[in-house]
Image (cartoon, rainbow, N blue to C red):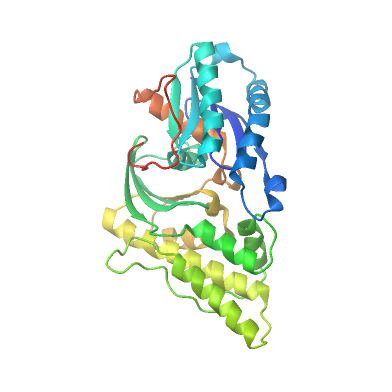
């Protein structure tokens, strides 16, 4: 079965055709980096307008690259939640119209479930259950994936997401947008032991994260060094901070693996492309003697292929929607 899927939850307009939930026949992504660089972050109104301008063309490109038409499709999938509400509405309304006109089932998909589905695209042999660390600009969670449509969040951030934390420090160092990518490149040239930062622990909740204190510690340390007139090597600072974030994430991943008895570990989301995090996660998996699945960088960031993969699982479970489908800015991963 072929599914045409759309992703417009933030600042990437994406369309893809996925067969049987495992095989990517096409995947096109139009980035908005140049539009938002001037502001140093995503401007919701600009993002929504750019989605409107791009989505119809990308749908055609995805179908053309897959060598199929609407008559060859079994369903239309779309990210319906969570995300920027205006951006989500563009994708949801386009998908609703397309599904209605083509007489196809409409499948709403949770954005984070889509990121987890990217692991199945990366490893078609990946079997449930597994423990997944989901890390992006807006989300940081430890998720027990019982089966393709049954999830339980076992740990989560209480405040800032890891990706937001990395972006903030990148801005402090004067790095260009998108900050997380630039910070990763810079960190690879620095000494990860040059600076010390606190752990992102939450008292009495060992599987949860709190990155606001880590971010504040970085801000204060930079300001204090500047006030004393001490030079800061940006590469060393970047490497040390990225190291602290990666270690904090993998400490909780190890604790969650022990608590759940996980047979397999997985890592996904935009921050899963970070070099240090991938290295630490692999080292942890090797030490525990567990397999680790991590999507390639192209499937870590927002894309529609992951939405198509999850849409297939949701469709098989009977999770479809009608023309009254509405987008939601927030929704629990466990709800679907």
40 on left or right of 168: right
Percent coordinates x, y for residue 256 in the rendering: 32, 58
Q: Can residue 190 be seen in this view?
A: no
In the rendered image, the vertical position of residue 178 relative to residue 327, given as above or below: below
Query: Measured from the top left, where is residue 228 in percent x and y?
Result: 63, 88
Question: At 66% from the left edge and 62% from the top edge, which residue is drawn?
Answer: 185
Residue drawn at the location 34% of the way across and 23% of the way down: 318
The C terminus - image quarter? top left
Task: Using residue 259 as the reference point, say whether residue 324 is left or right of it.
Answer: right
Residue 135 versus residue 189 in the image, above or below: above
323 or 28: nearer the viewer:
323
Please name whichever residue, 336 or 284, is drawn nearer the observer in this view of the structure: 336
Q: In which quarter of the image is residue 127?
A: top left
Query: Horizontal and vertical percent for residue 1?
Result: 48, 19
Q: Measuring 67% from the left and 87% from the top, which residue is drawn there?
A: 229
Q: Which of 105 and 249 is in front in this view?
A: 105
Left or right? Give the position of 178 relative to 149: right
x and y, in percent, of residue 136 in the image: 51, 51
């Amino acid at each position: 079965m072929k599914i045409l899927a759309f992703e417009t939850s933030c600042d990437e307009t994406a369309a893809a055709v996925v067969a049987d939930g495992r095989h990517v026949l096409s995947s096109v992504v139009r980035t908005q980096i140049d539009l938002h660089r001037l502001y140093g972050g995503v401007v919701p109104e600009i993002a929504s307008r750019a989605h409107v301008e791009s989505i119809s063309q990308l749908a055609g490109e995805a179908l053309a690259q897959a060598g199929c038409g609407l008559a060859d499709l079994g369903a239309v999938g779309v990210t319906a939640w969570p995300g920027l509400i205006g951006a989500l509405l563009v994708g949801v309304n386009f998908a609703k119209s397309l599904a209605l006109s083509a007489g196809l089932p409409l499948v709403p998909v949770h954005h984070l479930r889509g990121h987890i589905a990217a692991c199945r695209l990366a490893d078609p042999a990946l079997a449930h259950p597994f423990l997944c660390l989901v890390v992006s600009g807006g989300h940081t969670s430890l998720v027990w994936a019982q089966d393709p449509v049954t999830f339980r969040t076992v740990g989560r951030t209480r405040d800032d997401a890891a990706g937001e934390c990395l972006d903030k420090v990148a801005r402090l160092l004067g790095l260009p947008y998108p900050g997380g990518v630039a910070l990763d490149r810079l960190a690879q040239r620095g000494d990860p032991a040059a600076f010390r930062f606190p752990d992102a622990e939450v008292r009495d909740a060992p599987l949860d994260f709190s990155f606001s204190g880590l971010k504040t510690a970085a801000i204060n340390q930079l300001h204090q060094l500047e006030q004393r007139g001490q030079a800061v090597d940006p590469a060393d600072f970047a490497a040390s901070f990225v190291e602290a974030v990666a270690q904090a994430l993998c400490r909780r991943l190890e604790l969650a693996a022990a608590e759940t008895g996980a047979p397999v570990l997985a890592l996904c989301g935009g921050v899963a492309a970070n070099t240090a995090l991938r290295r630490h996660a692999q080292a942890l998996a090797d030490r525990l003697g567990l397999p680790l699945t991590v999507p390639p960088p192209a499937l870590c960031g927002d894309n529609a292929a992951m939405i198509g993969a999850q849409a297939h699982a949701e469709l098989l479970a009977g999770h479809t929607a009608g023309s009254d489908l509405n987008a939601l800015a927030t929704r629990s991963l466990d709800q679907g």
